[in-house]
Structures are given as structure tokens and as C-alpha cells.
Image (spheres, rainbow, N blue to C red):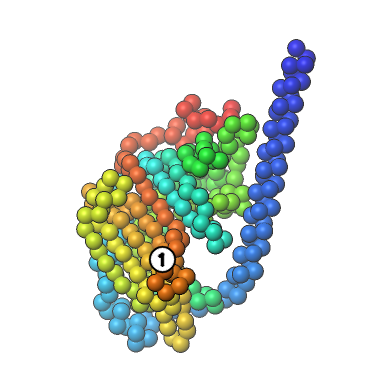
Amino acid sequence: MARQRYRVWLARLIAVMAVAGLLMLAARTVWKEWLTAEGRGSKSATHVTIPSDATNSAAQGTVASHALDPVLKLARDALVQHRQRDRDYRAIVTKQERISGKLAAVNRMELKLRNRPREAHAAGTAGPAGITVSDAGTAVNTNAVNPSRLMEVYLKFVEPKSLQGREVIWREGVNDNVMVVHETGFLNLARIPLAPKSPLAMAGNRYPISDIGLEKLLEKLIEKGERDRLLGGCEVEIIDHVEVAGRDCQRIVVTHPEPQVEWEGRSISHEFFRAIIDIDVEKNLPIHYASYLWPSKPGGAPSLDEEYTYEDLQLNCELSDIDFDPDNENYEYPK
């Protein structure tokens, strides 16, 4: 009996040491990536703001009327409708992201997401558009839409195999705003609290969990569209009846023929060469987004930068508190 207890104790000790080793390795990797990113971005600390009423003659031509106008109207209408109509949803989310210059493995996750109102929130209202340009020449639109609703998120990883079974729960503004995570198999020893933007939480992720969801995707599409509308230099194509994830979609393709555009005597870099947005016609929501980098050589194929797909989207499925509780008996969190 004593020998059996000793073996159990030894197995647990080995498991704890393995977890500690993995955490130290992940922290070391994240630290090195952070230092590299800091070195690359050290010249971007100072920003210049270009207001929406800029007098640049090229900008005036695009602000008056632009090919993105119908796309922006569609996105804003979809955002207002989503905020007013949809309280929660379930979906299978597939993502692939380029991190530190390398395309990461495909992640596939079960998602449950519930929204709750933010105090004094005006759904879908836009603030004044403007552009912030870093010294590195990257433009970011500012204040395109008001803050989104608060989120409650449950994720269960299906792919890749190394993450299969990992569960994550995050309730915005609850539990000190930290995620509750657990690993799988013999590593499933404890519930791990992680801040959404902490190095360990960001390992293998391009964006924090606070950026997940259809509302955030719509907001970002509007921000990107407003920025491109002000800067000019893009082409827009709209294609009807494209099937994506078994759904009838309207496809929007935005292309920047040139990597940079001149603004007030400065060269400003576009974020992507081409972006593809697929809007589910029935649900009026973007269920697929992909962006591509410029080909490395003339006539070459563009490189995928990031891609997200929402499959089997079920709206207003009456999610409850237990769906975002680690004590849910259907979840595998350690007790």
C-alpha cells in the first residue's frame, strides 16, 4: 500500500515538473520573440495623426466617393443588426496566423460566446475617423466604431493534436478579467489563471482572446475600410453566390496594387496585398476573412497572412452561466 502511494506521489511529482518545464520553455520562447519584436519596432514610438479633414488633394478625391462606400455601409449595417439581434452564438472556429514571420499551424476550436451590454453603449455608432501613422509607415484608423459589448467566451481546442482538449474560459470584467485555462492528459493538474495579454496567453497567438468574435471582426473590418478609404489606392470587387463552409456568401475582395501610398509627402505602407471577406447572406455576418501579403517576386502567388472561418454558426442558442463556468460537469477542468 505504501509503495502504491509512493508511485502515485512520484507520478504526480514528475507531472508537475513536466508542466513547470513546459511553462519555462514557453516563457523563454515568448521572451525571445518579445525582445526581437521590440528591436524591430523601436523606431515606431512616435506617431503622427492625420485628421479626417486633411487637405491632401489625392485624399479629397477618394473621401468624396470611394469604391469601399457600399462595403462600409454593408459592414456598419451588419454591426448594428448583430448588436441588436444576437445575444450569443456557437460555432467551430478555424484560424491560421502568421506569427513572427512564420505561418503557424491551423487551430480549430469549439466556440461559445455570449455578449452582455456595456454601460452607456450606443450600438453601431461611428466616431470621427482619423489616421494614425507610425514612423515605420503603418497607418491605423482611429475611433471608427464605439466599443463593443462585453464578452463571455468558452473555447475547446480540437486541432492541432498538441492542443487537443485544452479549454479556456474568459469573462470580460469578471474574475479580475483573467482567463481560466487547463491543459490535457497528465498536464491537466490545475486551473491556470492567465491575463489575456500575458506572454504565456499570447504564445502561439497573434491576438488576445479579447479580439475574438464576429462583433470584433466587424469592427476591425470597418476600421480597415475607413483607413483605406482615407488613404486611397485600393481596388474593390464584389462577387455574389460564393459557397463558404456550406453557406451562400457574398464575397468582397479588396486589393492594394501597390504596397505603399503617398500621403502628405510620406510613404505609408498598406497592411495587406489582398483581403477576402465572405458575408453569410442569410445571417448577414462575416463568416470568413483572409488577408494575403504581397508576392515575393513579380507574378508570384501572395502569401497567407491570417485567416479565420466560422463554421456551423448557431445564433441565439440561449447560452447560460454554466456554459462559462469551469465547474460545468461537461468540461474537463480539474476539480
Give the residue pinned by disc 1: 301
In the rendered structure, which amino acid carries the disc numbered 1? Ala
Residue 254 placed where, x, y %?
33, 67
| Residue drawn at the location 70% of the way across and 34% of the way down | 16
Q: Residue at x 26, y 61 (%)?
A: 74
| 21 over 263 or under it: above or below | above
Relative placement, left or right, of 325 versus 289 is right
Closer-to-camera residue (136/242): 242
Q: Residue furthest top?
A: 1
Q: Nearer the viewer, residue 183 or 74?
A: 183
**Residue 283 visible in image:** no
Looking at the image, residue 327 lies above or below residue 103: above
Q: Is residue 191 left or right of residue 84?
A: right
Does residue 307 show up?
Answer: yes
Counting from the top left corner in percent of width and height, residue 17 is at: 72, 36
Q: Is residue 298 left or right of residue 24?
A: left
Residue 62 pos. (x, y %): 30, 79
Quadrant placement of the N terminus? top right
Q: Is residue 266 or residue 46 the one in the foreground?
A: 266
What residue is shown at x 40% (from left), y 34% (from top)? 320
| Quarter location, residue 181 | top right
* Residue at position x 47%, y 48% in the image: 106
Q: Position of residue 150 (x, y in %)?
A: 43, 49
Of the 4 image quadrants, the one containing the C terminus is top right
Residue 76 image-quadrant placement: bottom left
- Badge 1 element: loop
| Label 1 crowd bin: few (<14), some (14–19), many (20+), radius 10 Å | few
